[in-house]
Image: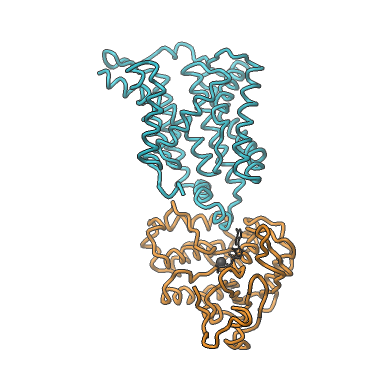
Chain colours: A cyan, B orange
Amino acid sequence: MIWLNIVIQGALVGGFYALFACGLSLMFGVLKVINLAHGDMAVVAGYVAVFLSPRLHIPGLWSFLVVVPLFALLGYVVQRTVIQKSIDRDPFTTLLVTFGLSVVIENLLLEMYSANGQSINIGSLIGESWHPASIIYISYVSLAVLAAAVLVLLALQLFLSKSGIGRLIRAVADDQEAAQLSGANYRHVFGIAAAIAFATVALAGIAYGMMTQFAPTSGGVNLLFAFEVVVIGGIGSLWGTLVGGIALGIAQQFGAHINLSYQILAGNILFLAVLAVRPQGLFGRRSSLA
Amino acid sequence: MSAALLEVESLTVHHGQLCAIDDVSFTQRQGEVLAVVGANGAGKSTLLRTIAGLHRPTSGCVRLDGKDINDLSVSRRVALGISLVPEGRRLFSSMTLEENLQVGAYHANPGPFDIKRVYELFDWMPGRRKQSVWQLSGGEQQAVAIGRALVANPRVLLLDELSLGLAPIIIEKIYALVPEILAQGVSILIVEQDVSQGVSAADRVHCLLEGRTSMTGTPAELTSEEIDRAYFGAGLVAPAVTSGVVE
Ligand SMILES: Nc1ncnc2c1ncn2[C@@H]1O[C@H](COP(=O)(O)OP(=O)(O)OP(=O)(O)O)[C@@H](O)[C@H]1O
Ligand SMILES: [Mg+2]
């Protein structure tokens, strides 16, 4: 029963990790940009939700309806301006620029909100859970986040494989020049991919704010987890991201069960083991490494 | 037949310090097949990629219908009717045959070609449209690359070394399409290392040697000796060499 609980709790956290990581994976897979400000974007989304929901009189639970579209727009604009400019210079510049963005965002948030933790108020829902067996408690919020992650990945998968724009995104990811030769304006395609990435990271940030507390510096550690998820699952594979998230969640729960201080260590060990045995990730294609 | 479609004027292109195309000029007329031949590294791909917009010229210009297109992006040029089938095919490797064609058709110009028409041109395709492109043979991949460019309905189709790595019989089949494509009003600019291939399909031949124009004319005007000299450079031509097949 204890083991079952570890798996269940791990999977619940893993849903969040997958939701959080899929934008990172998309940005890397399509734009070849490693967005070091990815974690901070999630935190910003949390703050924006906290800021907007009382002012627009929307309950915290539904704040994503406003924040997610807002971030999609922001993603497109940031891509077409700051990130594209740095891509045009050279790949290394994008690392510097996103790192710079990360530092600026953290400091701005510290300046505006102090280092105190905040969370998105969802009322009594936060404490409620389903209790199917003696020691197993399944938090409704976590379950909803896992469901959201699965839905988002499913929708994204459908979009990428069935829609014309989705195919263009994959084409640009496969071979940017060949996609241009097929008439694709790759900057616009990059913008759309960034919009999707920002939208998903906003959703993840809000989910995080509902499940626990966030502070201006929460982005960093979550970014580390997102990297681990992407590497474990395999770059460019959406289902890999889900499996990677759940695998990381379970590994962490397992570590925590042995000793609370082993939680993150266990995740890191899984990450290193996958890197050593299957560097392309569980679902990655070997060729996509080249 | 005689209107100038694509004009390249005093084009010079550098890769860093290296001058890959040096003051090259030519005109391609509507409905014409122009072959640019040249040895390894002569600058053929650089020329086509510059016309398609993937490289910026150092000087000179490319015109379509008399309009300077130097400042246009690759995708804008596709919209104006310039499509390149790149060297090495460059298919979208995570996609199926049909998806590759769908990407090409997404921003297509109106015209005679669509996916259905490509499936008629290559009758083996419909049965294998769901296959990943890496499961196809080299010749089949080349056909998909041509189809992907055709569905955009170009006015001029740039073909970079179609024959690379293919068996002679496959090459012959692919070149057999040229008249059909021409019949739809598409002009064709072929780049080949294999002189005999380029010359036999072309109305006019333009030979490049180390980035410069070394000869130009119609296949009828040119003797194979002249072509060899233009291809390899003076003094390098062994009398016995008659065909330009060098690897
Ligand atoms: N991206 C690049 N960067 C630097 N140098 C390049 C690049 N592309 C081509 N070159 C150089 O430019 C010259 C012309 O190359 P190009 O590929 O245009 O020749 P080619 O005639 O197409 O040769 P091949 O028959 O081998 O395809 C060569 O010396 C090549 O090494
Ligand atoms: Mg070449």
Quarter of the rendering containing residue A94: top right
Vertical relation: A33 (above or below) A201 = below
Q: Can residue B14 be seen by looking at this rendering? A: yes
**Residue B43 placement (x, y as % from top left):** 62, 68
Side (left or right) of B216 relative to A222: right
Residue at 50%, 24% (x, y): give it: A221
- View extreme (left): residue: A1
Decide if residue B105 is on the left or right side of residue A84. Answer: left
Of all residues shown, which one is farthest toward the front?
B235
x 39%, y 55%: residue: B132
Q: Position of residue B120 (x, y in %)?
A: 44, 68
Q: Choose top left, top right, bottom left or bottom right for residue B229.
A: bottom right
B143 or B165: nearer the viewer? B165
Task: Residue B169: give x, y in percent of width and height.
Answer: 41, 76
Kindly identify the residue that appears in the image at 37 percent across and 59 percent down. B135
Vertical relation: A191 (above or below) A223: below
> Does residue B157 show up?
no
The image quadrant where one finds ligand 1 is bottom right
Image quarter (top left, top right, bottom left or bottom right) of the N terminus of chain A: top left
Residue at (53%, 18%) from the top-left corner?
A: A214
